[in-house]
Image: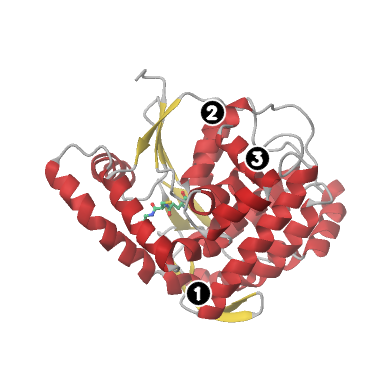
Amino acid sequence: MTTKDYELVAVQHSYYSAKVRACLQYKRLPYQEIGANIETILNRVIPATGNQQFPVVFCPDGTVLKDGCDIVEALEARHPERPIMPDDPQLKFVATLIETLADEFFVIPMIYYRWIPEETKQWGINMFKTSLGNGVENADLAAMAEQMGDTVSTEIRSRLPKVGLGKIEIQEKAKLITEAVCGLLDAHLAKTPYMLGDHPTLADLGMMNAMWGHLYLDPCEPSMFIRNDYLHLNNWITNMHSGAGISDQGNLYISDTLIPLLRYFADAFADMMSDILEAADTALPNAEAGAEAPTGLGKINTNLQGETLTRPATTYTAWRLQRVIEAYQAVPEAQQSETDTLLNDIGFQTVCQHQINWGLHKDNFKLYVMDQ
Ligand SMILES: N[C@@H](CCC(=O)N[C@@H](CS)C(=O)NCC(=O)O)C(=O)O
């Protein structure tokens, strides 16, 4: 390896790895992907970041980056060429909204497809054993990886109620939402090359993340209907996976075909987003300013397309929504009424115009409560 390479700790099958990989690819940055096996997690990821979560990027200058949205932001700041952030503040806001929807909300159906149908669940256990053990040299750790496939999958399945998937009606919604989103994405990509126009942006990285690791690669129903029926979507997914070859030329814009997709996302997730913001409004003003933020905000009663569910709200998701609100607030006055007309049309106005009475900031991979 040359010392100039970035190192990406990731797994092809992981939900959050695809955004960072697609960013490195599109920006044509030299990188090596290091599988997140048990050795790498114990010997490199945990010592550098404090826990086992990945993707993690080790930069050539020794800086460690963690959390997909922060990694992409840092790579954009270090390498502004072939930008993924639109200059236009309205498009920047829409890109941040789409990234957040994909990371924090559209993830619910993905979890369904891997962990609820019996066939994919067994496949998921084998996949975990393989990726945790792949390339592990220490014999004890290799044996541990073999045992951990079951442990990890049991642990992940125990988290299903945390996103409402304990309820059969929500599982059905997960399927409906996935089918509808794939259809709407395909119709959009038939007319417009990328999410926001002629070349990829953060919005494509975010949607690609949602499409790749579970939906496209898992042996699940959508991986087949995308290949068989949604050929524009299929093309875009495979292009985004090898983004070094994509042109960065052309214009960025919101095309008519994006509107039905955004409306659908609002119909599915806007209530849940507002409920999480309200949970933060209640919990965070009581938290000590300057202190590390609590990880949970308590349980919310919410709904997914009218189907009720109770789930915990996390401070992390509230922070992601704070970023969306900040991007909305950064739209200059001259574009405000156009942006509000768009928000009214698609249905995200309540979320984006929510007045937050708290603030969170990240430092050294942790969230802290800001002084108000
Ligand atoms: N917000 C993080 C989430 C990262 C994440 O949840 N990664 C998964 C793999 S795709 C993981 O490390 N899971 C193990 C765990 O949470 O213990 C990001 O966007 O990077």
Residue type highlighted by circle 2: Arg
Few, some or many C-alpha atoms within 10 Å of disc 2 (few <14, some 14-19, many ≥20)? few
In this rendering, which labeled residue sits more in front, label 3 or label 1?
3
Residue 60 as seen in the image, left or right of residue 239: left
Residue type highlighted by circle 3: Asn
Q: In the structure shown, which secondary structural element does the residue marked by tag 3 occupy?
A: helix
Residue 320 in sight: yes
Q: Which residue, given by chain and number where applicable, does mark 2 sit on? A: 78
Q: How is the image coloured?
A: secondary structure
Q: Quadrant of the C terminus?
A: bottom right
Specify the label residue 258 is tagged with. none
Specify the label residue 164 is tagged with. 1
Tell me what residue is drawn at x 39 percent, y 46 percent. 54
Residue 372 in sight: no
Residue lying at the far front in this picture: please name it: 228
Q: Are marks 2 and 3 in contact (CB under 8 Å)?
A: no
Where residue 116 appears, as percent x and y from the top left, is: 44, 69
Given residues 11 and 317, the one toward you in this image is 11
Asked if the residue at label 1 sits under 8 Å from ligand 1, the reply is: no
In this rendering, which labeled residue sits more in front, label 2 or label 3?
3
- Dot 2 or dot 3: first in sequence order is 2
Q: Are marks 3 and 1 in contact (CB under 8 Å)?
A: no
Asked if the residue at label 2 sits under 8 Å from ligand 1, the reply is: no
Residue 269 as seen in the image, left or right of residue 38: right
Residue 17 as seen in the image, left or right of residue 333: left
On screen, residue 194 above or below 281: above
Residue type highlighted by circle 1: Gly
Specify the label residue 235 is tagged with. 3
